[in-house]
Image (cartoon, rainbow, N blue to C red):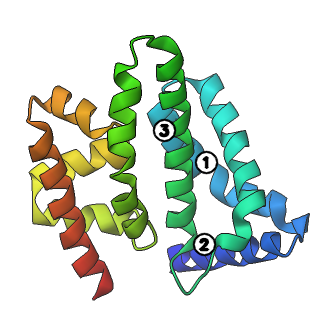
Amino acid sequence: MAENTSESLVAGHLERIARRDLSVFPQFYEATSGKLYAIILGIVKNREAAEDVLQELYIKVLNRAEGFDRERGKAIPWLMMMARHTAIDRVRARGRRDNLDGEKYLIAIEEDEDDLLDDAVATQVEGERAMEEVGQYDSACTQCIRAAFYEGLTYSEIAKRENLPLGTVKSRIRRGIRHLKSKMQS
């Protein structure tokens, strides 16, 4: 019940922010910043950078709040995916500057194609319930999905860390997401 109340509250704040009613922003920030900061910190691995990314995220939210639609999905997963993408963009940008041979840049381009699948699922993911559902399905899928969505690792990084072929990692994530979508829609 408290989760539904929180979801409803955050969605209402987003709708008011979309109408440029910024009087709710302090309450919106208080309700969302802890969870979003944790996601960002898990990806960028640096407190100062995470604070910068969080600030950047809230500027994006102010500019994109009108893109949120309760009919298409829930507010908290929408914010979590935006936080994840903003943090990954920061890490990739840092990687592009640090790597003159362009290897990480080419990997990022290849993996950006997979972001379309991530975005399709983003509005249906309900955080804890989603991971519990995937965990009951297949622990190998769960491990890959956690690494991608909560740690912000790319498919290539997961493959390297888990000592798996890249195709296996992609298959596990897709299989888990398909299972998750079927359960979340029922």
Whether residue 80 is visible to the viewer of this picture, yes or no, is yes
Q: Position of residue 159 (x, y in %)?
A: 17, 34
**Pointer 3 residue:** 88
Judge from the rendering whether residue 144 lies leftward or rightward of residue 138; answer left or right: right
Judge from the rendering whether residue 71 lies leftward or rightward of residue 55; answer left or right: left
Along the polypeptide, which appears first: circle 3 or circle 2?
2
Along the polypeptide, which appears first: circle 1 or circle 3?
1
The mark total stands at: 3
Whole-number angstrom distance, CA of label 3 to CA of label 2: 26 Å
Question: Which of pointers 3 and 2 indicates the residue nearer the eye?
Answer: 3
Q: Are marks 3 and 2 in contact (CB under 8 Å)?
A: no
Whole-number angstrom distance, CA of label 1 to CA of label 2: 13 Å
Which amino acid is tagged 1?
Gly
Judge from the rendering whether residue 95 lies leftward or rightward of residue 171; answer left or right: right
Q: State the residue at coordinates (29%, 41%).
A: 147
Q: State the residue at coordinates (39%, 35%).
A: 108
Which amino acid is tagged 2?
Ser
Circle 2 SS class: helix
Circle 1 SS class: helix
Q: Are marks 1 and 2 in contact (CB under 8 Å)?
A: no
Q: Quadrant of residue 11?
A: bottom right
Q: Which mark is residue 51?
A: none
Q: Which mark is residue 6?
A: 2
Closest to the observer, 6 or 112 = 112
Judge from the rendering whether residue 30 lies leftward or rightward of residue 158; answer left or right: right
Q: Quadrant of residue 6?
A: bottom right
Q: Position of residue 157 (x, y in %)?
A: 26, 30
Circle 3 SS class: helix
**Pointer 1 residue:** 34
Crowding at dot 1, Cα within 10 Å, few <14 / some 14-19 / many 20+, comes out as: few
Which amino acid is tagged 3?
Ile
